[in-house]
Image: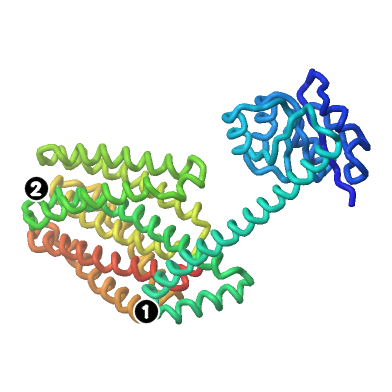
Amino acid sequence: MSLTLLVMSPPGQAPTPAHALLQEGSLGPTWTVVEGGDCRHLVHQFNAHAPNQVVLLGPALAVAESLATWNGAPPCAVTWLAANPGPDELSQLLDLGLTGWWPDAGLSAASLATGLALDGQRWQRHAALAQSLEQVQGQLSDRKYLDRAKGVLAQARGLDEDEAFKLLRGAAMHAKLKIGDVSRSVIEAAAWAEALNRAGQLRMLSQRLVKLAAQRLAGVDAHRARKLQDDSEQRAQANLDFLSALPQLGAQGEALPEAVARTHAAWSILQTTLAQRKSAAVLKQADDKADALLMQAEALVSELETASGRRALKVVNLCGRQRMLAQRLAKDALLAEMLDDGARREGFAQLKSEFEAALLELEMAPLSSPEIRAALKAAREEWTRLLSGLRFLDKSESRLAISRASEVLLEVFEGLTALYERSLQVIMS
């Protein structure tokens, strides 16, 4: 069996006794020695010659720079021939993947050949152990994802653990994938769906907060509106904190983190405006800031939907957007009456058209279940009540009906969004 030995040294390296031992034929018939030249070109020379082993000559610094190009995982045994190194130098080089060290003087050719063979065997054993460890870690990781995926599916469809496992196994066999990969996909899909839902809530909250502030100023269910406003502010902050901490954001480049940051900045401005003493002028200013937050939240939702790569999440986005439209229509109705704003009244038609079109699309979507159909029916009934209230904005009971209908619609679409989120078809997409 012939083994190729690649010898590398830094430019200007003075000859040492080791150079004579590394000449072709000196190490015996087992070794074919290739002189690779400058050790700074280690990777290039390795790729060119595909050696079984590498010998590096020269000072520790040059050896460290060469090994660093392999990020601590050389593809073969690497032996260093040099004068006695210090403990710190050896420790650093071992961390970079050095297999063994031998003195560059005082060795016979036979002794060096034996040392190189020992380093080769040591590297092979280490590589086998590393591969086994990686396999075990992979199995543990797969098990972790499998357990989490079974929990997601159990919650989504009320399955027990065995049924969820059979479903995952069947999906893996059908897709010709490992069950760990399918489980990881289930977890990732569920995480993206939650992120999309949270971002969608920010759209709704931007409008709800101003609606509730308008209710308080107009005396429409004011005590309850104050509590709901406090809860909404806490919810907005919690959602932004959640989105900022998402681990998958960092894997998407700069677009997603920047979208989250812009949304956070818009939220801070709205929060400051809402903290002022309530007046018609402050409400109008807050409404402008709410629209700025809405715009940034819409952009964030779009970025998340694109980054997730899962088109089935569109139904989650569509359902979540209905929450915002209901709140916006109720908010504009209150402000139109309070500020005597004809432009807002003219905008009702567009908002109603958007809500009605989305509701119809959801009613016709194939992704359904008895729970989803019942929730959509309840949404349709409450939507009719809200529309009825819009006809008589000058009446206090109508404004109260609009406010309450918008909250019921919010609750219904919160539940619907959760149903879509947990739906097996969405998760498995």
Q: Is residue 61 above or below residue 120?
A: above
Q: Left or right: where does residue 77 sit relative to residue 26?
A: left
The dot on residue 158 is 1
Looking at the picture, which amino acid does disc 1 mark? Gly
- Residue 249 seen: yes
Q: What x and y, as percent, mark residue 109?
A: 86, 36
Q: Nearer the viewer, residue 399 or 375?
A: 375
Give the alpha-carbon distance from disc 1 to disc 2, as whole Å: 45 Å
- Tell me which label, 1 or 2, sits earlier in the chain: 1
Q: Is residue 112 above or below residue 209?
A: above
| Residue at the image point whose x is 62% and y is 38% from the top | 94
Q: What x and y, as percent, mark residue 329?
A: 25, 56
For numbered disc 1, what is the local secondary structure?
A: loop
Can you identify the residue that label 2 sits on?
Answer: 217
Q: Is residue 193 above or below residue 151?
A: above
The dot on residue 250 is none
Q: What x and y, as percent, mark residue 406?
A: 21, 62
For numbered disc 2, what is the local secondary structure?
A: helix
Q: Nearer the viewer, residue 74 or 57?
A: 57
| Residue at the image point whose x is 27% and y is 71% from the top | 379
Q: Nearer the viewer, residue 93 or 200?
A: 93
